[in-house]
Amino acid sequence: MNKVYRSYLGQGYYGCIVPPVIKRNVIENPGWITQYTPYQAELAQGRLESLMNYQTMIVDLTGLDIANASLLDEGTAAAEAVTLSYRMFRGKRNKYFIDEGIHSNSLAVIKTRAKFLNIDIVTGSYQDFVLTDDVCGVMLQYPNNDGIINNYHDIIQQAKGLKIPVAMATDLLALTILKSPGELGASIAFGNSQRFGVPMGCGGPHAAFFAVKDELKKQMPGRLVGKSWDQYGVPTYRLALQTREQFIRREKATSNICTAQALLANVSAMYAVYHGPKGLKDIAMEVHKATVLLAEGLRLLGWTINNETVFDTIMISNGDISTDEIQRRCDEKKINIRHYGDGTYGVSLDETVIGSDLIDLLYVFGANEEEAASVLYSVSDADSNVSITGSGHERETPYLTHPVFNSYHSETKLLRYMKELENRDLSLCHSMIPLGSCTMKLNPTSALLPVSLPQFNTIHPYVPSNQTTGYQSLIDELESHLCSITGYDKFSFQPNSGAQGEYAGLCAILAYLRDKGEGQRDICLIPASAHGTNPASAIMAGLKVVEIPMNKEGEVTKDSFKQKIEEAGDKLATIMVTYPSTSGVFEDSIREVCDMVHYYGGQVYVDGANLNAQVGLCRPGDYGGDVSHLNLHKTFCIPHGGGGPGMGPIGVKAHLAPYLPGHPVTGPNPLKSFGTVSSAAWGSASIIPVSWAYILMMGSKGLKKASEIAIVNANYMAARLKGHYNILFRGTNGFNAHEFILDTRCFKNTSGIEAIDIAKRMQDYGFHAPTVSWPVSNTLMIEPTESEGKAELDRYCDALISIRQEISEVEEGKYDIKNNVLKNAPHPMYLVTASNWPFPYSREKAAFPAEWLNPYNKVWTGSARANDVHGDRNLVATHNQELKPLR
Ligand SMILES: *Cc1c(COP(=O)(O)O)cnc(C)c1O
C-alpha cells in the first residue's frame, strides 16, 4: 500500500545505495544485529573497532577533535548541542540563537527541549542577528535547509569574541568537498549519517553524529569508544569516560541516552571503509555535478535558481508553469519535490540519481520529453555560478587517511573484514544473553524480512500521506494491539528509544498538569532501584527528582513510597515506577501505590521495559498507570543491534492523549501537543513492522504463553541456582517474575571475588554475563526470556555452578585471591596459546572449563580486561591517535 516514488525532498534525508555486501552481511546478519551494547568489551572487539571507525570518520570529516559513537537522530543531536552550550555557562546565559536555515524538524525538537528548561530560543537570519553576552550558543546549518552554502565567517568571529560556542548542523557527503566545520571555527558539529549507506526508512533508524572540540569532551552526550591496554598489555577497545553516562550520574545526568544507533553507525562506517576517501569524494562530486547540470538546465527553461553556491539542493522559482501542472507531472513520473507554496520549489539530489532522473526532473519543470534530453546534453557544469569549484568553499584538507579507510575497496576484501570483526563478537548466534531488564530474545527472521522491502525502506519521511497508507494502517493496527495489551487508550510512535519515551511521557504529563492549572507540580518520585534513564529523563523535562531510598536489603518498601508521596503533597507531579520491579518481583502493593499517587493529584509513569513479564497477564493501564513506554527492541523483538536501533512508543490513558508528540512537517498534530521529540513523526518507522509481525504471528494465546514461559524459565533457573547462590528478592509466594538477582556480595569477604569477576569468567564458558551491579551493586541479574530451551538454561546454570566451585577453591585457599581463574578472566586465545604460561592453573582449566566446550563452539574473547583508568586518562577515541605506553 505504500507508494515508492523518487523523493528529492532533502531536509536531512537522501536516497542512497546500500552496498549489497553490507546489506546482506551486516544489516541482515544476526551476527551483527543481535549483539548487545558493548559493555562486556572483551566479547565486543569487532563492533567496538567498527564504532571507532565511525568516530574517526566523523572527526575527520567535521574537522573536530572527538566524536561519539552515534545519537538517536539529528533532532536529538541538535537539542543536545543546545543543552551542552547552555550548561557551559551554568544557566547564566539563557538565550540561544539559531539561524532560520535550520531543518524544521531539528528546530521543533530543540524548542520542545528548551521549553521545559527555560532556555530562550531565538531564531532569525545569521546576517542580521547581533550577538550579545547573554547568548550561550549559536547554531548554523551548513549547507542550510534550502541547500545554500553560506559564508558564516563573520558570525563565527563575533561568537568567538564573546566565547559563544558555535554548533554546525551539517552533511557528511557535502563535507567531503566542503571546508569542515572545524576549519570554519565551530566547536560542535552534528548531523545525520543516513546517506552513508542507510535506507531512508520513512525516517529511521539512522545514526546521528556529534563531534566536539577536545575541551568539550567531558560534556559530550552519548557513548564513546576508546582504546586502552588490556590486563596483559595488548591494545583493546572499550567504552570510555563512562562516568558521563546516566547510569552513574543518575539525577545529575545531563542526557538520557542509553539505546543509540550502534548498528546504523556501523553500517555508515562500513560504507566509508568500502568507498574510502576517494570513492566518497567521487560520489559527492557526481551528486554535485548532477545538481549543477539540473540548475543550468532549469535556467535554460526560464526558471530562476535562488541559491548562489550549492551542493546537492536547489531552490527553483519564477517559472511560467502552474503548480497544478508541476504536481501533475510529478505524479505522472512518480517524483516528489519540495513545494514551498509560493511558486518556489526545492530539489535535492543524491547518489542514486542518473541521467534519466535529470531528464524526468526537467520534464516536471515544463520541458517536453525530447526537449528535456536535449536541454540536459546542452548544458555544462563548467563555469556555473552555483558550482562549488572556485567558490572559496572547497575543502583542501585531507580526511580518512587511516589505513582502515584505504584497504577494503573490493567486495572480497570488505566481506572478509566484516566477517573478521563479526567473529570477534558474541551475539545470540552463539548463546543466550540473559541480561536482566534488557530482554534479549529471539528476533524472528520472518519478522525482520519486511525491513528490507523497498516499500518500507526507501520512503522519505516527508512524502505526502497518500504514499504511506501501508505504514499508516500497519501502525494503526499495531496501536490497537498495544492498547489491548497494555490497557492504554492511545499510542505515540515518535520516541525512538525507551529513554526518549520516558522523556516524551513526562512532557505529556507536565503539559496536562499545566493545562489543568497545576503548574506548581514539579516533583518526580523515583525509587533508588530505577533504571538510570528514569532520573535523567525527569531532569531533562525540568522536574525535581526525589529519590525513594532502598532499605538495607535493597528493597523499596510501600511505606517509603507512602512517606515520599505525602511529603510531596500538592507538588507531586509524577512517580516513575517499574513493574515488575527491577528486583524481579511482582510487588503486591503496585495498585495501592498508584492509588496513593492519584489521591495526591499526581500521575503514574510505569516504565514498561519489563513488559515481557506482563503481556497477556496484566496491564499497566489496569493497575494504575497513566503512561508507559514500551521498548519494542526488548519485548517486541526488534534486535538490539549492539546498542540500537530501538523504538520506545508511549501509551497513555485518554486524558493524556491530546498532549502527545506532534510533528511540524507531517503531523500528527494532537490538539494540545507538548511538542516534538524525534526528527521523524514515527521515529524509526522502518523497524516497526518487526513488532507488528511478531504480535500477529504470536496471536493473543501465543503472547500470553510467551510471558508464562519467560516467568517459568526465570524461576527454573533460580531454583537450580538457589543451592549455590542466594537469590536476592522473592515475591510473597516465594517466586520471581521474569528475572531474578543473584546476590554475589558475600564472596567479597570470603574470596575477594566480585560480580564483575564472575561476569568475566562467564566469557571463558562462552557466555555473555548477566546484568552486572544493577539495580543492586555487586550482584548479577538474569533474564532468560521465553526464547531459550531447557538445555541452554541448564548450560548457563551449569556454568554458574561450576564458577561457584571455582570461588570455593579460592575460599579454601587453593588459589591466591589475586591470582585465580576468576580474577584473570577472561582468557583470550593469545594468552592461552602463548609459550609462556605463568598461571597457577592449567590452560585447560582457563579455556575449556566445561565438558561441553570444544574447539568448534569455543567463543574466544578478543582481549582480556581493559585498563579503564589508563584509557580514560589518556583518551584515544580515533584511529589517528597513538595509545600512550603504560609506565
Ligand atoms: C532498557 C530500559 C530503559 C531504557 O530504554 P532504552 O531504549 O535503552 O533507552 C528504561 N528502563 C528500563 C527498566 C530498561 O530496562
Image (cartoon, grey):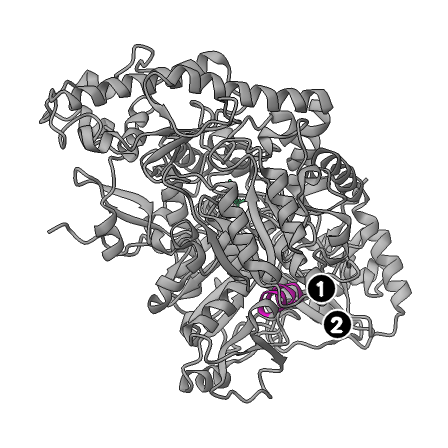
Give the numbered dot on residue 316: 2
User: Which SS type dominates the magenta stretch?
Assistant: helix
Q: Secondary structure at mark 2?
A: strand
Quick check: 832 above or below 405?
above
x 42%, y 40%: residue: 775
In the shown orientation, is residue 604 left or right of residue 432? right
| Residue 238 placement (x, y as % from top left) | 32, 44
- The amino acid beneath tag 2 is Ile
- In the rendered image, residue 800 lying in the magenta stretch gets the answer no
- In the rendered image, residue 105 lying in the magenta stretch gets the answer yes
In the shown orientation, is residue 559 left or right of residue 728? right
x 14%, y 30%: residue: 817
- The amino acid beneath tag 1 is Val
Quick check: 744 above or below 674?
above
Q: Which residue is mark 1?
A: 347
| Residue 772 placement (x, y as % from top left) | 36, 36
Quarter holding the N terminus?
top right
Give the numbered dot on residue 564: none
Q: Which residues are magenta?
A: 104-114
Q: CA distance from mark 2 to mark 1?
A: 8 Å
Q: Are marks 2 and 1 in contact (CB under 8 Å)?
A: yes
In the shown orientation, is residue 732 left or right of residue 416? right
Q: Is residue 684 visible?
A: no
Q: Quadrant of residue 123?
A: bottom right
Front one among 718 and 27: 718
